[in-house]
């Protein structure tokens, strides 16, 4: 079994403030460690379920967060950014049996995590895909599915886990935090690790053909920017149009084209 993991940090257990996600801040070390522990737990669950090869995309900020020496020998780690449109799941392809997302978070314009955002916390105030508030999970799960790779597990804040279950009830989730205003209410980091390990193993023992996340035949991406100048600039991307001073719509028939727009305009 080949297994793919994409790992972010804003949904890691206990995280609450942007300082804790930033390599230049002293609080970052604790959450880099916890991010690594949660990825390791996912690896251990996959190995227990029979995985022989694990590819991990470090998908937060610099892409240089996970401590490689703490991963199992079966793991391969993708660090930094190729600048391919697939972004947080770059490296995924046909031939992987399943994928998991670790440390993911609620989308922009949601109130479920103090760090809620979609792709850019600075540029984007809201993103919708086919009328649905769009998370980084949703975008990259569709990318995975377009390569016949089911996403079977996700850990992150409670709001995101609820959205994930709405898209596919079979996906195993572990809620690490619950956001309330600017606060988070988290489970113990050790418990999160235990739950992630068990959840990944459970997910991989299911019939992987039953996962049902569907790929739309047509995509309508609406991006509301924090600044009108950003929207105006992005409206000149081929196929995009300005809906309001701060909102751009882009329509296409391919998730790759969606991700291309995000690469160049977000």
Image (cartoon, rainbow, N blue to C red):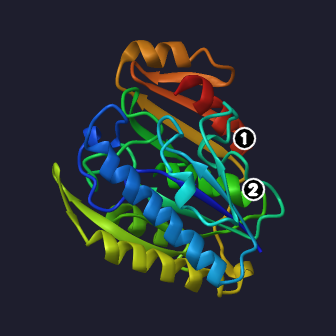
Can residue 100 be spotted in the picture? yes
**Residue 18 disc label:** none
Q: Mark 1 or mark 2, which has the lower sequence index?
A: 2
User: What percent of the width, then of the height, locates residue 63?
Assistant: 54, 40
Residue where numbered disc 2 is placed: 146
Q: Is residue 50 left or right of residue 65?
A: right
Name the spot of residue 215 as percent of width and height, x first: 69, 58
**Between 133 and 185, the one nearer to me in the picture:** 185
Q: In terms of secondary structure, where does tag 2 sit?
A: helix
**Residue visible at 66% across and 84% down?**
49
Q: Secondary structure at mark 1?
A: helix
Left or right: residue 104 versus residue 109 is right
Q: Nearer the viewer, residue 83 or 132?
A: 83
Residue located at (63% from left, 19% from top) = 237
Give the residue drawn at x 72%, y 41%. Answer: 256
Determine whether label 1 and label 2 are within 8 Å by CB. Answer: yes
| Disc 1: which residue | 256
**Res. 106 in view:** no
Label 2 crowd bin: few (<14), some (14–19), many (20+), radius 10 Å? some
Compared to residue 62, the image places residue 146 above or below, namely below
The alpha-carbon separation of the residues under discs 1 and 2 comes to 9 Å
Q: Position of residue 213 (x, y in %)?
A: 63, 67
Q: Is residue 20 above or below residue 234?
A: below
* Label 1 CA crowd tier, 10 Å (few <14, some 14–19, many 20+): some
Based on the displayed image, in which of its 4 quarters is residue 47 positioned?
Answer: bottom right
* Quadrant in which residue 27 is drawn: top left
The correct choice, above or below, for 258 with respect to 238 in the image is below
Question: Which residue is more in the foreground, 232 or 28?
Answer: 28
């Amino acid at each position: 079994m080949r297994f793919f993991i994409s790992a972010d940090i804003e949904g890691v257990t206990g995280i609450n403030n942007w300082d804790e996600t930033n390599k230049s801040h002293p609080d970052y070390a604790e959450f880099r460690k916890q991010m690594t522990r949660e990825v390791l737990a996912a690896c251990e669950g996959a190995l227990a379920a029979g995985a022989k090869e694990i590819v991990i995309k470090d998908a937060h900020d610099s892409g240089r967060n996970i401590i490689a020496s703490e991963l199992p020998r079966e793991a391969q780690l993708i660090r930094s950014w190729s600048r391919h449109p697939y972004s947080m799941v770059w490296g995924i392809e046909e031939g992987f049996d399943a994928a998991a997302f670790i440390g993911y978070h609620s989308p922009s314009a949601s109130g479920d995590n103090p760090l809620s955002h979609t792709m850019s916390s600075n540029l984007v105030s809201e993103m919708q895909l086919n009328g649905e508030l769009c998370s980084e999970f949703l975008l990259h799960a569709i990318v995975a599915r377009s390569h016949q790779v089911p996403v079977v597990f996700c850990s992150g804040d409670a709001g995101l886990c609820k959205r994930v279950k709405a898209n596919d009830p079979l996906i195993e989730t572990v809620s690490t935090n619950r956001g309330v205003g600017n606060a988070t209410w988290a489970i113990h980091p050790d418990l999160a690790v235990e739950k992630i390990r068990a959840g990944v193993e459970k997910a991989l023992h299911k019939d992987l053909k039953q996962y049902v996340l569907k790929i739309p035949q047509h995509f309508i991406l609406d991006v509301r920017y924090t600044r009108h100048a950003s929207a105006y600039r992005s409206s000149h991307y081929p196929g995009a149009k300005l809906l309001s001073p701060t909102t751009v719509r882009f329509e296409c028939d391919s998730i790759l084209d969606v991700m291309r727009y995000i690469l160049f305009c977000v």
